[in-house]
Structure formats: structure tokens, C-alpha cells
């Protein structure tokens, strides 16, 4: 088959091949890595770069079809009761389809061809409405309104020919034009290619009542148009390669399984992507999830749902995407990577609060708080218990160097299995029942704004695992929870923490040096109790600092943080001495 060439914005996507073409979730079936990388756009994907010398017309009227203007090399193999079979050995052929009726169009072609939809409504009760048995490119050009529907069973499903969608193609399908196409798949998929599909223009409405909405073997590219999908299975699935979205609108109103699933990479650099799924919203089974642009909204409802998931690889977020993830499952994760997670830009909002699913945290005994290693049981991430809804999780390292990140979760808001490094950006993390920011390796706070509101008892606003270090060398830092956690090591920026838990009631907690307010942090609720850890470039060792509450704070607020605020009135709550 023709090599798939994907459009990439910043990164090169590695293509993967797999022994099983039908289960991209099966990452243990002896998959191998294809070392080819994408080299850019493919001019052959543009129908306007092609030449079409002859047009064959097919018009349906009820259960009959009229075929006219056959070109040399195009043979009408069969035309019975609306079922049309064309076999072509000719180049540069266009097929123009229109009318309303029942039947099927099946095409065998030795060469690429153009399929123009000029107002077609076609229903096939026992097979695909469009059945392309050519491995060559099919250029689909849409004009006017068009509709395709298949039946719930195929009478010819036992033949050697593959056919598993209302619109099925063995070869590449490239869609363009200004019209609309509605495809309803009742047997399996709505639109399927055993090669790749690219959507450049047009409006697609895909309804899959049995399986996937848009399904391919070798890749999916969306760089324009509008795609609306409702699917009993996966809304968009690629078996062995990547899914690339550079533009257009993808609106997944229902996914009974995954919203977007690629065996290899999922690369989103533009467009608007909206996903409603009962399982995973956006998933790479064996590659990376790379997001560098676009507006992405994901909602999942399953107990073990994942908003964005790299099952074996990394999550990489850079540029200026806007990402909103809401999960409602009892053990759901907002954004998860088994590999590293790197965030250097964008606006990211995650809510992982369990929704309608009941969830009661089962944390280990917590004691009464205290300083590092105090009565809260000493340093250590999760104090036993179960894994509940988390905001951002990596089983490896998390590195944040930019972006605006706002996380609210029942379990950890941010959880790194390895080292956690924050050197820039703005992070606001709030956990209602566990740690706000949790690292199972060393934690390096080097810059940016870091705010963590953790749970009570053994939970912390900023938590570092036992025998691991918290190294502070920069940034504006605020953490509150049942205790201050971690071993402070090689800190080059002053920090301090209160010795006892205090109640803070008001709109903002203000850190000040005498009459000078250093920063103000917006509280996630009207009242919050805990021990505070604070650090700022404006703090000096051995100086005393005050924590107060105020509802009268003004200044430029970004993600719950105001630098050098103007405070009209405040109430003193606690003091500490910087170290």
C-alpha cells in the first residue's frame, strides 16, 4: 500500500506496526517499531493536483440505478436492483453519484479515482452502501447533502472480501468539498479504510450503532472540515499507526468505549476536539500523546475512565493548547502517562471528583500533622489506601516548565511516580482527600508559581516520598495540608512552615513581611485548615513572616495567585521564621 505521510506541526511521529490489525489495545502481541518518520505533507492527497479525463454517472431511483458515460477501460460488471459493480483498468476516472434509493456501489480499480457525491441517499440492507475494493486512493469530493446506511447483517459477509462499514474502502480515502455526508453503520463501523483516511474539508456525521465511527488500519489525518460522531464502540480508532489532528472540528458526542484511540501516537496541533466517552477520552496504546495546539475538551464517565492516556508512552504538552478534562469515575484519571509527562505551555484544567460514582478515600491513619516527619507519620506519599480519582499522573517523571495548570481531584491532584520538577508556569492543585502535589521521587521547585491545597491528617499540599528530598531553588510556593512533608535538601531559596494547624477563613491567604504583602493565594473554599509551607524569592533566612486572611485583596490575579497584592484589611492567623 501507499506509504502514509502525516502532517506534523512540531514533532515527528513514529509509526508503529502490529501483528493484530483489529485490537490496538493488545500491546503484547509482538508489535514492532517502524523506524520511518514523517517527512511532511503529501501533494498526492490533494484532489486538485490530479487530472480527471472522464466522468461516469451513477444515479439511483428507488431500487434501480442508471449508469451512463462509461469510459474506455471501465466495465459495468453488474447492475441489478440498485446494486452496481464497476471494474476499471483506466486512469483519471471520476464517478459522480446522486439520487435516492437502495443498493450498493462496488468499485474495483487498478488506479486512483475520484468519487463525487452530488446529492446521494443510498441504503443497503445487506452490505456496505459504498464498497471500494481498490487499494488505490479514493478522492471523495462532497457537494450538496448525502447519506449512506447499511444493514445490521451482511448477506455476503462470508466472502473473501473485507467489508465492515457502511462506507468501506481497501485503499486510502481523502475527503474534501463543501457538502455533507451522513453515514450510519449498523453492521460494524460507519466509515472504514484498511489504509488511511484524511479529512480535509466537508461535514461528516458518523453514527455507528454496532462498533466504531471512524476506523482505519494505517492512520487518520484531520486538517479541516467538521466531524460529528456517535459510536457504540470507539469513536475514532487507528489499528497500527497514528492519528494526527491539525485543524477542523471533531465533535464526539458519544463513545461507548474510547473517544480517540491510536496504536501509535496521537498528535493534536490545532482544531477543536470535543470528546464524551464512557471509558478513555484520548488514548495512545503504544506511542505518545503530543498536544501543541487546539482546543480540547474531554468528559469521561466510566469508573476507570482516563481523559488523556499514554498507555506505554509519554504525554507531551507544549505551545498554546486549551485543554479541559472532566472525569467522573471512582478511580478515574484526568491525564495519565506511563512514561514521562512534560508540560511547557498551554492552559490545562482538570476536574477528577468522582461525579455520581460514590468514592470514600481510605487513607491510612494520619495523626495530628506537624513539621517534616512530625506526628503525621513522617515523610511518605500515599499513606496506604486506595487509588481514587487523580488529576495528573505519571508513573515516571513529571516536568513542568510553563503553562497554566489548574487541577481539582479527590485523590492526588498531581502525582509523579518518579522525579517531579517545576521550573516555570503556574500550577494550582487542590485535593479534597489526599495530597495536592505528590512526588514519589525527589521534587525540584525551581521557578514559576506552585500552589497546593491538600487534605487533612497525613495529607499535604506538597508531598515528597520517604527518603526523598524537596529541593527549593526558586518560584513562588504555597502549600497547605495536614502536615508539611519531605526532607528539605540543598535549598537555595528561603522557605518556612507553620508549627501547628490553623484555620483560614476568608477569600485569600496573604503572605506578608510586616506591612508588605508578598503574595496572596485564593482559597478553594471559604474556610481551610492546615499547616502551611511557603517560599518566595522575596523571603530571607531568619526573617519572620505573617500569614493572614482577607476578602479585600486587589491586583492582577493569575490562576489563583496575586503577586504584591493590595490588601485593604486582613486578619492575622499565624507566623513562621524562614529557614
Image: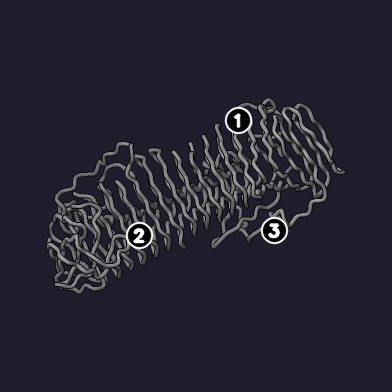
In screen coordinates, is 158 left or right of 323? right
Cα–Cα gap, marks 1 and 2: 48 Å
Residue position for label 3: 43
- 365 or 212: which is nearer to us? 212
Front in this rendered view, residue 252 or 413:
252
Q: Secondary structure under badge 2?
A: strand
Give whichever of 438, 477 is nearer the camera. Answer: 477
Residue 186 percent across, percent down from the top left: 59, 31
Q: Residue at x 15, y 52 (%)?
A: 375
Residue 441, position as x, y percentages in the image: 33, 57
Q: For mark 2, what is the residue?
A: 420
Percent position (x, y) of residue 330?
34, 39
The local crowd at label 1, few if under 14, some if 14 to 19, many if 20 or more residues have their Cα within 10 Å, is many
**Where does label 1 land, which residue?**
187
Q: CA distance from mark 2 to mark 3?
A: 43 Å
Question: Would you say 375 lies left or right of 450 here?
Answer: left
User: Can you tell which of label 2 and label 3 is closer to the viewer?
Assistant: 3
| Residue 332 horizontal/vertical position (percent) | 37, 43
Amino acid at each position: 500500500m501507499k506509504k502514509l505521510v502525516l502532517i506534523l506541526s512540531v514533532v515527528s511521529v513514529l509509526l508503529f506496526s502490529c501483528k493484530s490489525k483489529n485490537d490496538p489495545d493488545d500491546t503484547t502481541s509482538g508489535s514492532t517499531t517502524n523506524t520511518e518518520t514523517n517527512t511532511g505533507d503529501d501533494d498526492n492527497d490533494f484532489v486538485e493536483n490530479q487530472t480527471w479525463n472522464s466522468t461516469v454517472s451513477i444515479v439511483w431511483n428507488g431500487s434501480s440505478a442508471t449508469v451512463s458515460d462509461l469510459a474506455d477501460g471501465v466495465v459495468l460488471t453488474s447492475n441489478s436492483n440498485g446494486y452496481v459493480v464497476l471494474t476499471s483498468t483506466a486512469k483519471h476516472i471520476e464517478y459522480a453519484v446522486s439520487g435516492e434509493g437502495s443498493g450498493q456501489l462496488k468499485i474495483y480499480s487498478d488506479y486512483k479515482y475520484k468519487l463525487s457525491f452530488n446529492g446521494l441517499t443510498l441504503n443497503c440492507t445487506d452490505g456496505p452502501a459504498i464498497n471500494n475494493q481498490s487499494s488505490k486512493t479514493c478522492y471523495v469530493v462532497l457537494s450538496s447533502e448525502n447519506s449512506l446506511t447499511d444493514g445490521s447483517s451482511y448477506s455476503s459477509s462470508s466472502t473473501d472480501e473485507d467489508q465492515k462499514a457502511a462506507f468501506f474502502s481497501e485503499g486510502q480515502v481523502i475527503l474534501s468539498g463543501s457538502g455533507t455526508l451522513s453515514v450510519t453503520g449498523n453492521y460494524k463501523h460507519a466509515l472504514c479504510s484498511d489504509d488511511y483516511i484524511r479529512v480535509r474539508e466537508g461535514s461528516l456525521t458518523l453514527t455507528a450503532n454496532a462498533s466504531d465511527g471512524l476506523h482505519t488500519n494505517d492512520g487518520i489525518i484531520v486538517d479541516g472540515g467538521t466531524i460529528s460522531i456517535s459510536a457504540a464502540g470507539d469513536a475514532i480508532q487507528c489499528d497500527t499507526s497514528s492519528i494526527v489532528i491539525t485543524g477542523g472540528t471533531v465533535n464526539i458526542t458519544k463513545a461507548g468505549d474510547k473517544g480517540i484511540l491510536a496504536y501509535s501516537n496521537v498528535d493534536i496541533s490545532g482544531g477543536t476536539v470535543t470528546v464524551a466517552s464512557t471509558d478513555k477520552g484520548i488514548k495512545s496504546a503504544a506511542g505518545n500523546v503530543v498536544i501543541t495546539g487546539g482546543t480540547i475538551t474531554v468528559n469521561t464517565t466510566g469508573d476507570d475512565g482516563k481523559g488523556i492516556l499514554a498507555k506505554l508512552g509519554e504525554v507531551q504538552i507544549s505551545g498554546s493548547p486549551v485543554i479541559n478534562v472532566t472525569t467522573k469515575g471512582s478511580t478515574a484519571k484526568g491525564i495519565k502517562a506511563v512514561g514521562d509527562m512534560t508540560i511547557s505551555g498551554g492552559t490545562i484544567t482538570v476536574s477528577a471528583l468522582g461525579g455520581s460514582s460514590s468514592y470514600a478515600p481510605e487513607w491510612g491513619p494520619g495523626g495530628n500533622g506537624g513539621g517534616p516527619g512530625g506526628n503525621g507519620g513522617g515523610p511518605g506519599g500515599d499513606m496506604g489506601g486506595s487509588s481514587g480519582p487523580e488529576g495528573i499522573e505519571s508513573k515516571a517523571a513529571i516536568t513542568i516548565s510553563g503553562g497554566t495548570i489548574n487541577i481539582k481531584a479527590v485523590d492526588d491532584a498531581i502525582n509523579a511516580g518518579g522525579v517531579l520538577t517545576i521550573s516555570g508556569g503556574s500550577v494550582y492543585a487542590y485535593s479534597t482527600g489526599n495530597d495536592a502535589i505528590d512526588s514519589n521521587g525527589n521534587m525540584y521547585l525551581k521557578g514559576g508559581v506552585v500552589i497546593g491545597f491538600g487534605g487533612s491528617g497525613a495529607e499535604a499540599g506538597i508531598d515528597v516520598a520517604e527518603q526523598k528530598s524537596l529541593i527549593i531553588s526558586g518560584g513562588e510556593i504555597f502549600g497547605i495540608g495536614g502536615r508539611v512533608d519531605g526532607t528539605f535538601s540543598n535549598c537555595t531559596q528561603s522557605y518556612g512552615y507553620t508549627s501547628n494547624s490553623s484555620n483560614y477563613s476568608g477569600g485569600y491567604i496573604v503572605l506578608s513581611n510586616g506591612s508588605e504583602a508578598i503574595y496572596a493565594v485564593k482559597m478553594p473554599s471559604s474556610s481551610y485548615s492546615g499547616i502551611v509551607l511557603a517560599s518566595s524569592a522575596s523571603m530571607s533566612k531568619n526573617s519572620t513572616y505573617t500569614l493572614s486572611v482577607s476578602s479585600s485583596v486587589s491586583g492582577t490575579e493569575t490562576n489563583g495567585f496575586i503577586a504584591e497584592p493590595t490588601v485593604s484589611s486582613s486578619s492575622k492567623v499565624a507566623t513562621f521564621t524562614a529557614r
